[in-house]
Image (cartoon, helix red, strand yellow):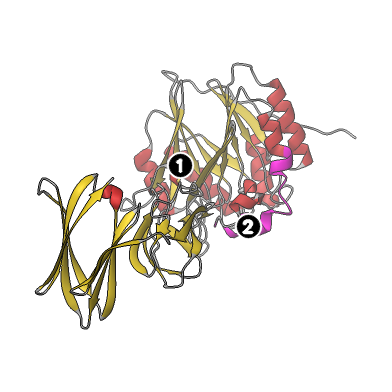
Amino acid sequence: MFLLLICICFRSLAQTDSSYTIFVAGHAYGAHAGTNIGLHPPFLAKLKTSLDSKVSALFLTGDIVNQSTNESWAQVEQELLNLRLRSYYSMGNHDNNPIGLSVFIKKYGSTYYSFTIQNELYIILNSTESDRSISPAQLQFLDQVLKQADTQQKRIFVFFHEVIWNSLEKYKLVRSNSRSRYEYMVNISNFWNQVFPMLTAYPEKKFYLFAGDVGGNPDAIAASYDQWQNVSLISSGMGEVKDENFLKVNVLPDTVTFKLIPLDDGIVMHPITWYNLPEKPDQINGAIYVIPPVSAVRYEVSPISNATAYHWILSGGITGSSDSSAINLSFNTGFQNGNIVVSAVNDGFGESDSAVLDVRADNTLSSKEENVSGFKVFQNHQFLQFAINSEVVANAQLRIFDQMGRLILNENLLLNPGVTTKTVTINSLGQGLIFIELSKGISRLIQKIMLH
């Protein structure tokens, strides 16, 4: 039995210099309920205004037509002919029937093939031949193409439809189109155990992988990006999301850059690297020791660039709520020890690993002033705490001066019936002698404290 491996090699496209551009578009038929039989009309319109002399080719990463009929394929071919744009197809599940197969065979000789543009190698694979996987025949084809690649070809571009790398648990919350989500990939895709090792076997080369099964469900992401060793994983798509887009790839002599082009001029896309799981927050900044009961103790992490929210988890005896990178917490009377946990969230991609801070009650307190006019001031090595008693809702003012008389803190406080506490971190006040003035109505506490 003989296995025929088909490799279609087109001549390199002539350029006036060594830089050129390609466009990559996923789910190019657009919306499931669309009436177009060819390409997504907003996509066509945007293409017409985006073309320039640098654009060498358009890569359609699957689901090119909604219904794979002769009429649909003829419409797509005519639309691309009108644009005078060289195009390359990857097979999507909507394209995959006998008619779609005949289109690929007539146009390229196979549903998987390779060619070069200038000195870069381009490989088209078919992730529908073995459902959401790369078939054994294609693995042999890929191995052969890589072995025969010119040693000077340092950058290799690979295209297929489904986001087959989503079979990794890291991507279990990534909302690609439904077929490409983790639960439908984990027991099917062979990307991580067979395809990825073939690419990392060539560490001197850079691989750029493109998938197109995103943007086609109302809750789907419109793009994704990640990098593993010498392999970049990229997706973009359109159809049923506000930020539907296609990808502009600039192939420059010393680098490759990516820009997402929104179909709606009113949409601003993030840099491609934004479309990924967020990084783990660094350390949580805030008091390690607290004097319970205490409220409004601030904790925060440095903002993560692509986080859309933060998930805070608190031990018993700690209360507070926030979805930002900062939170104000209250510690109940009986609090002794516990922890504060926070992770960064990027909606549509998932949640990062968590940062954790252990917090304890400080039992080495000293009272600097005992109940003068309803006020108390406590101090430990880390912060000052002010306790103000009030029978009704009232206002108070806290002012702190340095030894030169300069005002270094001025805060107005709203008091609720009972005891209201305010905590100030000592390191925010500097060192040396400070003067504290705490007033409520006609009552006033004046205290001087030496900070070290």
Percent across and percent down for residue 440 are 14, 72
Q: Is residue 270 left or right of residue 404?
A: right
Q: Is residue 123 left or right of residue 350?
A: right
Q: Nearer the viewer, residue 197 or 43?
A: 197
Percent across and percent down for residue 375 are 22, 70
Looking at the image, residue 239 lies above or below residue 112: below
Q: Is residue 220 left or right of residue 182?
A: left
SS type, badge 2:
helix
Looking at the image, residue 59 lies above or below residue 298: above
Residue 317 can be seen, yes or no = yes
Query: What type is the residue that disc 2 sits on?
Result: Arg
Name which residue lies at 57% across and 49% down: 73
Q: Which residue is mark 2?
A: 179
Residue 347 can be seen, yes or no = no
> Is 446 colored magenta in this rendering?
no
Query: Which image quadrant for residue 318?
Result: bottom left
Q: Residue furthest right?
A: 1
Percent across and percent down for residue 196 are 68, 37
Q: Nearer the viewer, residue 414 or 158?
A: 414
Query: Label 1, label 2: how many angstroms apart (C-alpha)?
Result: 23 Å
Percent across and percent down for residue 16 are 41, 18
Q: Residues within 10 Å of mark 1 (few under 14, many from 20)?
A: some
Query: What type is the residue that disc 1 sits on?
Result: Thr
Q: Residue furthest bottom?
A: 391
Whichever of callouts 1 and 2 sits on the residue coming sooner in the sequence is 2
Looking at the image, residue 137 lies above or below residue 357: above
Residue 405 is tagged as: none
Q: How many marks overall?
A: 2
Q: Which residue is mark 1?
A: 273
The stretch in magenta equals 175-194
